[in-house]
Image: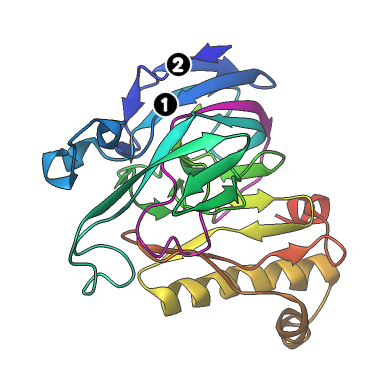
Amino acid sequence: MIIDGEKVIFSFDAAMEAAYVAEAGSALTVKTHDCFYQHMLEEGSCISTFEMDSANPATGPIYVEGAEVGDILKVSIEDIEVADRGVAMVIPGAGFLADQNVEETKLIIPIEDGKAHLLGLELPIRPMIGVIGVAPEEGDSYPTNTPWNHGGNMDTKDITAGTTLYFPVRQDGALLALGDAHALMGDGEVGVTGLEIQATVKLKLDVIKDKDLAWPLLETEEATMLLVSGDDVEDALRKGLEHTLPLLQKGLDLSWNEATILASLSLDAKISQLVDPKITVRYPIPKSILSTERILEIL
């Protein structure tokens, strides 16, 4: 099934209506827009000519048949193909050093032979998805630029081909939407953009019945991690650890203190992004310590 990208959302809302329908177990090809809806690729464009209400379009929502409240939506990312050019910017008053970012700069960056060409450098690309999520709890609504426990703008560089996301289903059908792909982004996304780019994403959707998650879960080849967001860095890191420690505790039959010692010795606190309305972090649990299957079993 091909989803053309003509229908998008700008907020993840509990009451949003499905634009597409897919069966559980189906494979999808989803076309996505860059975070500026391609506006910054136009000659002479700048942030003052961009309508911010059109930022971070997410293709969807996709109603997944068989996904019911209290289930988990499993999204396997099989491939991300990006366009042949994208954009990166410094925007006045934005970014981790917002007070020092006073002059707008825009770079249109070509992609050739799997490399981004900028500033005299050739950087190998690593395409990833910035915005991906599902409908939130009843009564809630979050702009697509904001991450929370429904997913959203988590801007986590590990959300790439070969990884799997698990989302809590809060509304029947889950109502998946995605966009804001980056050809390349470093942890933190400190300047406020990655290499923003259009993409074609190949996904497989499955439903895990009668399991619940407090936060989205990401499985990579090496590790499993919750993607947790907070109001600031300390809040996000604290929440992330408070939700990760019980996985170690229950999964390995440890005391709280034993789980804390293990975490201190083996888990790296990683900051996904520092520049969105909420901050996103992760504590990857190596699969050599605890498998994804065991984590899903104890939920």
The residue that disc 2 covers is 20
Residue 182 visible in the snapshot: yes
Q: Secondary structure at mark 2?
A: strand
**Please, what is the three-letter code of the amino acid marked with disc 2?**
Tyr
Report the residue that reaches farthest toward the front.
Answer: 120
Report the residue that reaches farthest toward the top.
Answer: 1
The residue that disc 1 covers is 61
Q: Is residue 150 left or right of residue 94?
A: right
Residue 172 visible in the snapshot: no
Q: Quadrant of the C terminus?
A: bottom right
| Residue in the image at 46% along x and 71% along y | 236
Q: Which secondary structure type mostly characterizes the magenta part of the structure?
A: loop
Please provide percent x and percent y for residue 11.
30, 39
**Please, what is the three-letter code of the amino acid marked with disc 1?**
Pro
Please provide percent x and percent y for residue 15.
32, 32
Q: Is residue 169 left or right of residue 95?
A: right
Check residue 94 in the rendering and tell me which mark sits there, or answer none. Answer: none
Whether residue 26 is in magenta: the answer is: no
Please provide percent x and percent y for residue 158.
62, 52
Report the residue that reaches farthest toward the right.
Answer: 288
> Relative to 166, does residue 31 appear above or below in the rendering?
above
Q: Who comes first in sequence, dot 2 or dot 1?
A: 2
> Relative to 255, does residue 164 appear above or below in the rendering?
above
Counting other residues with Cα less than 10 Å from the Cα at mark 1, is it few (<14), some (14-19), or many (20 or more)?
Answer: many
Counting other residues with Cα less than 10 Å from the Cα at mark 2, is it few (<14), some (14-19), or many (20 or more)?
Answer: some
Q: Which residues are magenta?
A: 185-214
Q: Secondary structure at mark 1?
A: strand
Whether residue 210 is in magenta: the answer is: yes
Give the camera-side residue of 185 and 135.
185
Q: CA distance from mark 2 to mark 1?
A: 6 Å
> Relative to 29, does residue 149 appear above or below in the rendering?
below
| Residue in the image at 31% along x and 64% along y | 95
